[in-house]
Image: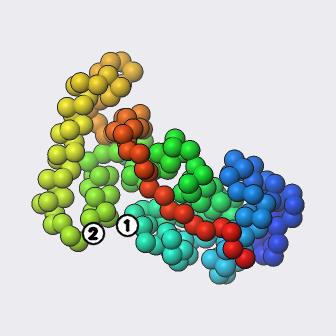
Amino acid sequence: MGLTASSLNLTQYDVEEVQEHCGGRFNHREIQCLYKRFRALDKRHKGYVSEDELLSIPELAISPLASRVVQVFQNLNFKDFVLMLAAFSDRASREEKLEFMFRVYDVDRDGFISLSDLETIVKHLVGSSLNEEQVALLITRAMGELAERRKRDKRFRDGDGNAGSGGITFGEFQVILEGAEKLPNVVVPVGFD
Ligand SMILES: [Ca+2]
């Protein structure tokens, strides 16, 4: 992209490139608006937004998982910034949202949601309203239920037909959430000037 950190405006070519990158989820005008917002966030015109700068987006900051989300998406250039907002928006597909959630939950990025990942997430979600013991109890219950489902449901088994014993895979994550009608949405308004 011919876009430099100090570009004031996007060229038509830049806009088309960004639009393609986000699967056409935002139109040209919206991308121009997002670029203004990106430039306002990127105060020193580095060409990317840092964790702190992302947290200054009010719609993001109110999410209980905001600090995890910005860890996943830190140091975003403009194209990836738009991609992140697309995954957050109500324009993303269910699959895209699940992939995004999985990345947020998989704290150590090993491709599984393990006990220690869940501990971190649950602590973010419940804040200080639960003590350590209660958090541990919640997680033990959740993992117990998972172990039960692995015995009953063949979609919870790995390719060799064995019930997995480690963390939750993305496939399992999808099955666990298949009954959830509403996935978290953080809608960042884009139709402003
Ligand atoms: Ca993990």
Give the percent coordinates (x, y) of residue 146: 24, 37
Give the percent coordinates (x, y) of residue 62: 43, 72
- Indicate the amino acid at tag 1: Pro
Which is nearer the eye, 73 or 10? 10
Would you identify the image quadrant in which residue 177 lies? top left
Residue at 32% x, 58% y: name it. Answer: 121
Give the percent coordinates (x, y) of residue 112: 37, 42
Considering every residue shown, the one lying at the far front of the view is 181
Res. 97 visible in picture: yes
- Residue matched to label 1: 64
Would you identify the image quadrant in which residue 170 lies? top left
Res. 52 visible in picture: no
The N terminus is located in which quarter?
bottom right
- Indicate the amino acid at tag 2: Gly
Give the percent coordinates (x, y) of residue 74: 54, 64
160 to the left or right of 61:
left
- Residue matched to label 2: 127
57 to the left or right of 146:
right
Residue at 22% x, 42% y: name it. Answer: 143
Q: Are marks 2 and 1 in contact (CB under 8 Å)?
A: yes
Element type where label 1 sits in the image:
loop
Element type where label 2 sits in the image:
loop
